[in-house]
Amino acid sequence: MRFTIYNPEPLAEFIDVSFTGEAEDMLMGFLSAYRDHKGKTQLLEHLLSHEGIYIPRYYKIEYDDAGGILRREKTDNAPAVIRKQTIPDISKSFMKSAITTPEIEFSNMYLLEAMRGCPWSCRFCLAGQIYKPARKKDIAVLKTEIKEALTMTRRVGLIGPSLSDYPHAEEILMMEGVDFSITSLRANIKSARIAALMKGHKSVSIAPEAGTERLRTVINKKITEEDILDTAQRILQSNIETLRIYFMIGLPTETEEDIAGIIDLVKKVRANSPKGYITLSVSAFVPKPFTPFQWHSMLPLKEVKERLKMIKKGLLNEKGVRVFHDVPKYAYMQGVFALGNRSVGALIKRIALGDALALKDKSFESDLDFYVFRKKDISENLPWDFIDAGISKEKLWQEYQKAIEG
């Protein structure tokens, strides 16, 4: 059994059931069926009629000589399309998470969802596409959940892709006796006010993603350089110890001028406020299914490394500025698992069985490059095309063309 939203195919060989979308409303029906059916085959046949449940064994895939999907055929009474499930009111969701171990990032913290989905629809972002429409939790419900959390820990993490857009964020953060942690904020005046309520906290994050106005337009990140500089200045002047700034490299149409723009933007942030530390968190762009960039290729690893070196060298002498980045090879593997079809299962199996050389196998490497290092066309059968995520392939393609054309 697996809970997924976009591409279950790399794991198709290993799973019996995949929940597509938001599973809260699907779970009760699944558990009832599980109790009523003793045999696996009988249970799976019954589940074929359940909306949002995908059972890989009832589908056969044929591939062309290049490794692409030639056709996909369903068997028995399996649905041709699996529709993503969405709960209309997250205030009624029972999903909560308490992490009480001291050994991890969210140690001794109770995580609560304030908002699901994002109204901004950045073209690289999976959450902004598949969690539509954006939904906000009722403030009375959230306050009750926070009070319940306080019986376990003072540390409460508020979750939401765009917490700045939660209308009651400031009122919630003024609750006494709670040590709040928040996700990254959008660069705007409201985020600066929210940051002011986080005095005493070690860090606050903003995510410009790109260093130039041109590239932020390409990815549909609707914030200006003025927004970024003003918000960063207000955060650092609020006695926040560290401002964390998220950037991506390898975005569609990116040039060296855009990388230089990251360096220049960070230098301006530092010049505006000498207080505190600035930490860059730089990741490699990974195309995601059901986003306008699902057809785009990843940047070759050699070029990713060169651009990382350029950023680190350009900010080497900036006081209080630190640069952290993910491992390019790991980003490459993210791309393989995000974009791959069932053939990727063979690699997963070798890794799971402890084959340390699987990732260095040249025959595997050339096959995996097929998923991540080539541009695709709207006519191609993508591994996840059988899922209806609530947005048409044609609409996504139009957004992709708008991005590439600038």
Image (cartoon, grey):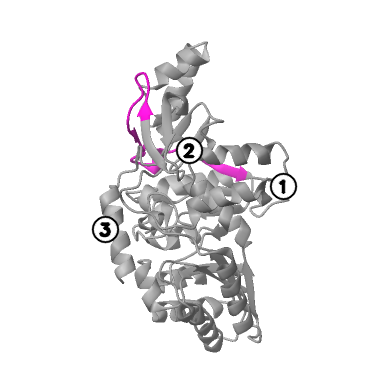
Q: Quadrant of residue 386?
A: top left
In the image, what residue type sits under mark 2? Glu
In the image, what residue type sits under mark 1? Leu
Tell me the element at label 3.
Answer: helix
Q: Nearer the viewer, residue 41 or 136?
A: 41
Numbered badge on residue 357: 1
As displayed, is residue 336 above or below residue 343? below
Q: Nearer the viewer, residue 199 or 17?
A: 17
Is residue 93 located in the magenta-colored stretch of the structure? yes
As displayed, is residue 118 above or below residue 32? below
Is residue 196 located in the magenta-colored stretch of the structure? no
Mark 1 and mark 2 residues within 8 Å of each other at the beta carbon: no
| Quadrant containing the C terminus in the rendered view | bottom left
**Label total for image:** 3
In the image, what residue type sits under mark 3? Gln
* Magenta residues (range): 73-98
Residue count near mark 3 (Cα–Cα under 10 Å), binned few <14, some 14–19, many ≥20? few
The spot of residue 9 in percent (x, y) is 48, 38
Numbered badge on residue 9: 2
Q: Residue at x 61, y 47 (%)?
A: 363
Tell me the element at label 1.
Answer: loop
Q: Which residue is mark 3?
A: 398
Q: How far apart are the two marked residues, 3 and 1, measured between alpha carbons?
A: 41 Å
